[in-house]
């Protein structure tokens, strides 16, 4: 059945509610974006939709018809005029009908809705990166755990492959789901006078608007008329990123331990001086992470030291070795070591010894269970 509107018609509607040519994501353009007539229309449309009694009545009828299937209203934010261009709810099928959850989106900008589920696709691949905890810091290493320069037992079977699942939007409903979806769809169509938007139309790109986190060139009709936050078009298998695996620090090569030992000391100093990190640590919600390719670079150390110097004047540390004076001495020692290093190859033994000494003192003083 042909749609009521052509893609050209739908684009005309998009441009009534989304300003063209303004990057609403960039901080400098955010205010200008919100001051446009188009954005004002969208906010007003959201608030009108929130006041429409047909919406809560629809949810009540679904709950009465399927009392064993939880219905979650995902549009409670609409009275604020923020987010989305649709009514949104999820519908959880009973376990007898495979237990999946269906999502329904009903646009209040155009007379269309969509319904979809999710499916899991399993991948088995060779890991391309790994994680290791050292010196109280989680390191994310952008190289293979099978690299013998980094991992001493790189031939371990556990490091040969990783199995993981990816979740994808699925517009094709199963035989178990169809009876529920069809009943709800008939009620949606009768209530709002709308029809289902075909996926091949919904995924059409809108080249010159931004919608929430979609930058120019990324937004699709689904984003403009329903909601942002979904990958409406599944990534190709080659684009799926393989997760890393965990490696114990005891299995690292001596060369790599030298690198992350220096980095651990350096970033422990930086984060101890950062007020935001101090607050997160106090609340118990901070566990620092550093990304590295396994090579220590002089420019990275100098960049972090520059940040440390800014934070040290005036001193902001509330924890550390024994005192701000000792922390200052440790920083000066590292600066001298870096100045004498040509930046090539492994970190010099003197720098590794400095990091070992610093971490030994630091980790004791940072341990709340350590005796004073």
Image: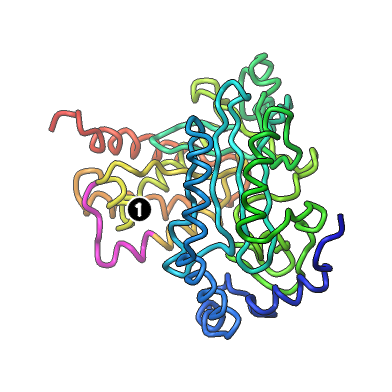
- What are the residue bounds of the magenta stretch? 308-319
Q: Position of residue 230 (x, y in %)?
A: 64, 50
Q: Where is residue 152 in the image (x, y as percent from the top left)?
A: 61, 20
Q: Mark 1 points at which residue?
A: 331
Classed neighbour count for the residue bearing mark 1: other residues with Cα under 10 Å, few (<14), some (14–19), many (≥20)? some
Q: Residue at x 39, y 41 (%)?
A: 287
Q: Main secondary structure of the magenta part?
A: loop
Q: Which residue is drawn at 70% across and 78% down?
A: 15
Magenta-colored stretch includes residue 313:
yes
Give the structural element (helix, strand or loop) at label 1.
helix
Q: In this rendered view, identify the residue nearer to me: 30 or 273.
A: 30
On screen, residue 214 versus residue 314, left or right, reads right
On screen, residue 254 versus residue 269, left or right, reads right
Residue lying furthest right: 2
On screen, residue 353 versus residue 17, left or right, reads left
Q: Residue at x 76, y 70 (%)?
A: 10
- Count of numbered labels shown in the rendering: 1
- Residue 143 in sight in this render: no
């Amino acid at each position: 059945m042909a749609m009521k509107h052509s893609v050209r018609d739908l684009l005309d509607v998009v441009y009534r509610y989304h300003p063209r040519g303004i990057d609403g994501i960039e901080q400098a353009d955010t205010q200008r974006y919100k001051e446009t007539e188009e954005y004002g229309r969208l906010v007003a449309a959201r608030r009108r939709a929130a006041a429409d009694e047909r919406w809560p009545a629809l949810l009540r009828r679904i709950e009465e018809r399927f009392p064993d299937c939880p219905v979650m209203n995902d549009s409670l934010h609409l009275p604020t005029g923020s987010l989305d261009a649709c009514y949104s709810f999820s519908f959880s099928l009973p376990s007898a009908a495979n237990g999946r959850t269906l999502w329904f989106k009903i646009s209040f900008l155009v007379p269309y809705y969509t319904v979809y589920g999710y499916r899991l696709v399993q991948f088995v691949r060779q890991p391309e990166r790994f994680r290791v905890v050292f010196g109280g810091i989680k390191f994310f290493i952008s190289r293979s755990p099978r690299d013998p320069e980094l991992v001493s037992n790189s031939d371990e079977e556990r490091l040969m492959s990783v199995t993981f699942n990816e979740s994808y939007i699925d517009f094709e409903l199963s035989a178990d789901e169809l009876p529920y979806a069809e009943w709800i769809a008939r009620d949606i169509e009768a209530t709002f006078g709308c029809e289902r938007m075909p996926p091949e139309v919904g995924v059409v790109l809108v080249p010159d608007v931004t919608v929430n986190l979609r930058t120019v060139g990324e937004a699709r009709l689904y984003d403009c008329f329903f909601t942002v936050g979904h990958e409406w078009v599944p990534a190709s298998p080659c684009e799926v990123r393989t997760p890393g695996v965990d490696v114990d620090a005891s299995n690292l090569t001596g060369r790599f331990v030298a690198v992350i030992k220096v980095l651990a000391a350096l970033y422990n100093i930086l984060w101890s001086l950062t007020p935001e990190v101090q607050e997160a640590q106090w609340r118990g919600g901070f566990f620092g992470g550093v990304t590295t390719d396994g090579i220590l670079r002089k420019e990275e150390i100098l960049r972090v030291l520059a940040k440390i110097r800014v934070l040290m004047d005036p001193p902001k540390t509330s924890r550390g070795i024994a005192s701000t004076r000792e922390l200052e001495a440790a920083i000066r020692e590292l600066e001298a070591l870096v100045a004498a290093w040509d930046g090539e190859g492994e970190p010099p033994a003197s720098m590794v010894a400095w990091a070992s000494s610093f971490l030994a003192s630091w980790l004791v003083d940072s341990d709340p269970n350590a005796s004073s």
